[in-house]
Image (cartoon, rainbow, N blue to C red):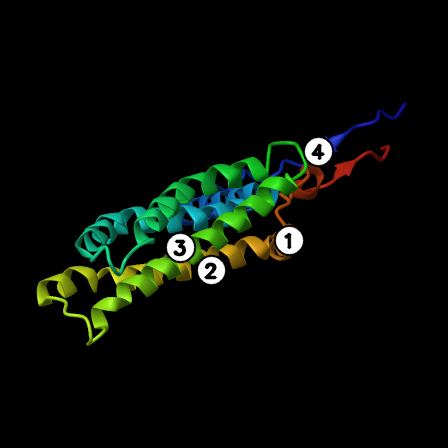
Amino acid sequence: MAENENVLTEAPAPVNPPKGNKKGGKVKEWFRKKVVALKRKPHTIALFVLAVTTIYFMLSLFKLSYALSTCDDIYVKASGICQFVVTLLSLLVLVSMLNAFPKRKKPNIFFIVLVFLMLAVMVACDVVIYIETAYIFDPSISVSVDDISKIQPARPLLIGHMVLLGVSAVVFALLPVYKRLINKINTKVQLESATENMQGSIDIQED
């Protein structure tokens, strides 16, 4: 009487991948996780740009305050309150941005509009400060060289802040566009099945 014999050929021992491949795999996995996080919260990009803008203004605040304290109150009337408004809104705009995209809820339209409104007000205030501090270049007004040296360095900082505010507004407005592009990135992990890696064959024929 013949007996059924199952003969399984031994598969070769798995070969450990080189260390270089391990490091490369970790880097790819790190980038994959970051892309997955961006898919869940694409507004993080706009929030990052806003945070950079706020940090830039805070670092420039000392020179701006020093320049305004030097200005003549006769010619610079609204710059002081404008700078206070910009300082306040620079912090509140981050809070509004966070409230605009609550977790597991739909975006809050009120706070989205409020963010754009705050950005517009800050740009307007910067323009007022820039215009009022331009009196130092008026030849009909006597301004000392020392005052000019204190006020003039603050004006490029204002331009830089206005540019960053514009960039922040554009990045925020384009959120639906790059959200779709990010969602198109393939972040699926391909798992290899055990049968695909199995080598050899199974003999189930009768003798």
Q: What residue sits 52% from the left and 37% below the top?
A: 98
Task: Tell me which label, 4 or 1, sits earlier in the chain.
Answer: 4
Mark 2 or 4: the one toward you: 2
Q: Residue furthest front?
A: 74
| Crowd tier of the residue under label 3, counting other residues whose Cα lies within 10 Å: few below 14, some 14–19, many 20 or above | many
In the image: residue 96, left or right of residue 62? right
Per the image, label 3 sits on a secondary structure element best described as helix
- Badges 2 and 4: C-beta atoms under 8 Å apart? no
Q: Which residue has dot 2 on it?
A: 166
Task: Tell me which label, 2 or 1, sits earlier in the chain.
Answer: 2
Type of amino acid at the residue the image marks with label 2: Gly
- Residue closer to the observer: 60 or 85: 85
Mark 4 or 1: the one toward you: 1
- Residue closer to the observer: 31 or 58: 58
Q: Which residue has dot 1 on it?
A: 176
Q: What residue sits 70% from the left and 33% below the top?
A: 8
Task: Tell me which label, 4 or 3, sits earlier in the chain.
Answer: 4
- Badges 4 and 1: C-beta atoms under 8 Å apart? no
Q: Position of residue 189 (x, y in %)?
A: 62, 43
Task: Tell me which label, 2 or 4, sits earlier in the chain.
Answer: 4
Q: Which residue has dot 3 on it?
A: 125
- Residue closer to the observer: 135 or 4: 135
